[in-house]
Amino acid sequence: MNAPLNHPLPLLDLDVLRTFVAIAETGSFTTASTAVFRTPSAVSMQIKKLEDILGCSVFSRDARSVSLTTDGEMLLGYARRMLAINREAVSKFIIPDISGVVRLGSPDDYGERVLPHVLKRFAQSHPSVAVDVIIDQSVNLRRRMDDRALDITLVTNSHKMPLAGGEVLLTEPIVWAGAKGGCAHMREPLPVSIWEEGCAWRAGALEALGREGRNYRVAYMSAHTAGQRSAIMADLAVAPLPKSFLGSDMVELTAKDGLPDIGNYTLGMFVAPDAGAPVKAAADHIRATFEMFRETGRF
């Protein structure tokens, strides 16, 4: 029989685990510090305390990056489960028991890039609310809202057009995206990958090309972000994208590359005027997600 422990095992601080998970998910002490509302030095002290308790390193750090060690990867699973259990327990006492269905619309690009983050956090805090997601073009989503077929929708909109009845979540430049090391932008006429009619990015891009008198041809057309990226990465065409959508394998093409400035676009949100508690809660989560993006540059 094993001898009983003379001293109880130390308790892990949930606040420290929250910081640990934030660093693991963002890959940055600085970005995580913003997410958990602490200074970078305070975050470093929390991780040092955690490593002292466990007697091992949980992160490998160098001048450019932060990555989990083998022990850190093991701890990450435990930390997420402990935080989830804490949320579940606390929510039974301090969060109203909200249930129902939220009908949420989104354009394809933000449905792919942002909604997974929103839905994950919303499900954790409101497990009794079901969310039905519709992915469609912004113009069609506006019609669905008018027909009361949606409770909330995100839409992309030209910055020149008023967002009557909606609220602006984000204003961002549209840029020309090309493959890193590619030459599609040098071809004549310019091969362009665009969306269907009604897309704010398409309208701004084609208007800019017309203003500059640049010859172009539509070389690739898709309503899906994945299709647009495929055309760019294959160096078949250049495409208008929000600046934050550029990946490490893409470059922004500017006037020095012979391409005109496109301007900005806005991402807006419409919420049904008679929204109930589940819809209001989902809208608040979406607002919080974009507030975090504006502060950290990450979703």
Image (spheres, rainbow, N blue to C red):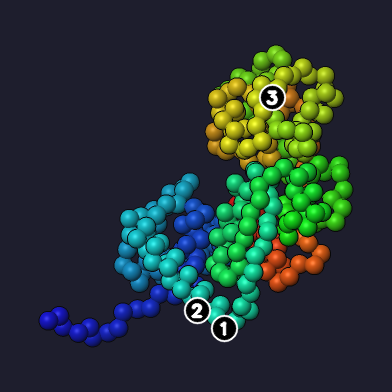
Q: Secondary structure at mark 3?
A: strand
Question: Which amino acid type is shown beneath numbered disc 2?
Answer: Ala
Q: Say what secondary structure mark 1 lies in.
A: helix
Q: Residues within 10 Å of mark 1 (few under 14, many from 20)?
A: few
Residue at 65 percent across and 65 percent down: it is 101
Side of 157 where 107 appears, left or right: left
Q: Report which quarter residue 176 is drawn in.
A: top right
Q: Position of residue 24 (x, y in %)?
A: 46, 57
Q: Are marks 1 and 2 in contact (CB under 8 Å)?
A: yes
- Residue drawn where x is 64% and y is 43% of the image: 109
Q: Secondary structure at mark 2?
A: helix
Residue occupying the point 70% across, 63% down:
283
Contact, mark 3 vs mark 1 (Cβ under 8 Å): no
Q: Quadrant of residue 152?
A: bottom right
Q: Is residue 214 above or below residue 116?
A: above
For the residues labelled 1 and 2, the Cα–Cα distance comes to 7 Å
Residue 219, position as x, y percentages in the image: 66, 21
Considering every residue shown, the one lying at the far top of the view is 188
Instruction: Give residue 242's quadrant in the image.
Output: top right
Identify residue type, mark 3: Val
Q: Residue at x 78, y 58 (%)?
A: 148
What label does residue 287 carry, if any? none
Q: Residues within 10 Å of mark 3 (few under 14, many from 20)?
A: many
Residue 79 as seen in the image, left or right of residue 243: left
- Left or right: where 88 falls relative to 205: left
Q: Is residue 61 left or right of residue 42?
A: left
Give the camera-side residue of 275 and 154: 275
Instruction: Find residue 192 and name its label.
Output: 3
Residue carrying label 2? 89
Above or below 72: residue 188 = above
The circle drawn on residue 93 is 1
